[in-house]
Image (cartoon, rainbow, N blue to C red):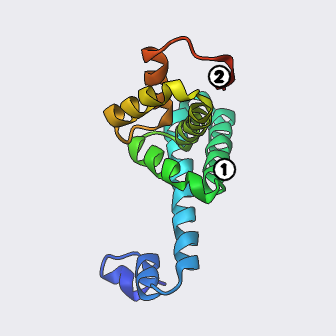
Amino acid sequence: MRSPSAARGQPWHVVALTLCWWCPALADVAEDADSREAIVLACHYEMGEFGVAAVQRCIESETSALTALSRYPEPARAIVARCERDLPQHAWESVKTCVDQDLAAEEALQRYPVQRQSSIEACRNQLGRQGAAKVKACVDRLSPAAPEAAKP
């Protein structure tokens, strides 16, 4: 049986979510289902020629990465959002790697000595919102003799 919205060319779940704007939990479930469906489709497209086992591993790793991204603490949300924005065509595994690298680099930058703070600030200004991993690489290029305590 078709829903009334299907007759107008709109999927029923879009109409239901539009009418239920006050139900953020339902929207999250729908977004999560859409993300998981996108993972399945992308893995079939990218890995299908390598067989069922490769597709299954892809789905498992991408789903695991998506789940891990949703569990990062609140302070890391800005990094997650930046990596998602900067890697729109990449897999969730790539986004998670981006986040992990930035978190590790930010931690390392915090341990750099005071003498390198001007280099850190210069690199942050030069690179804008590109992330801590690129800032750390810039600082390390400017003064390659990094102390042992600063290495992650």
Q: In this view of the protein, which residue sits in the foreground, 148 or 71?
A: 148
Q: Is residue 82 left or right of residue 58?
A: left
- Residue 32, position in %: x, y? 57, 63
Label 1 – label 2 distance at C-alpha: 25 Å
**CB contact under 8 Å: marks 1 and 2:** no
**Mark 2: secondary structure:** loop
Q: Quadrant of the C terminus?
A: top right
Q: Quadrant of residue 114?
A: top right
Q: In this view of the protein, which residue sits in the foreground, 150 or 74?
A: 150
Mark closer to the chain start, 1 or 2: 1
Q: In this view of the protein, which residue sits in the foreground, 101 or 58?
A: 101
Instruction: Kindly identify the amino acid type of the residue bearing the numbered disc 2.
Output: Lys
Q: Is residue 5 left or right of residue 137?
A: left
Task: Please indicate, yes or no, whether residue 2 appears anywhere in the rendered image.
Answer: no
- Residue 28, position in %: x, y? 55, 70
Report the residue marked by disc 1. 68
Report the residue marked by disc 2. 151
Residue at 42% from the left image edge and 88% from the top image edge: 19
Q: In this view of the protein, which residue sits in the foreground, 42 or 83?
A: 83
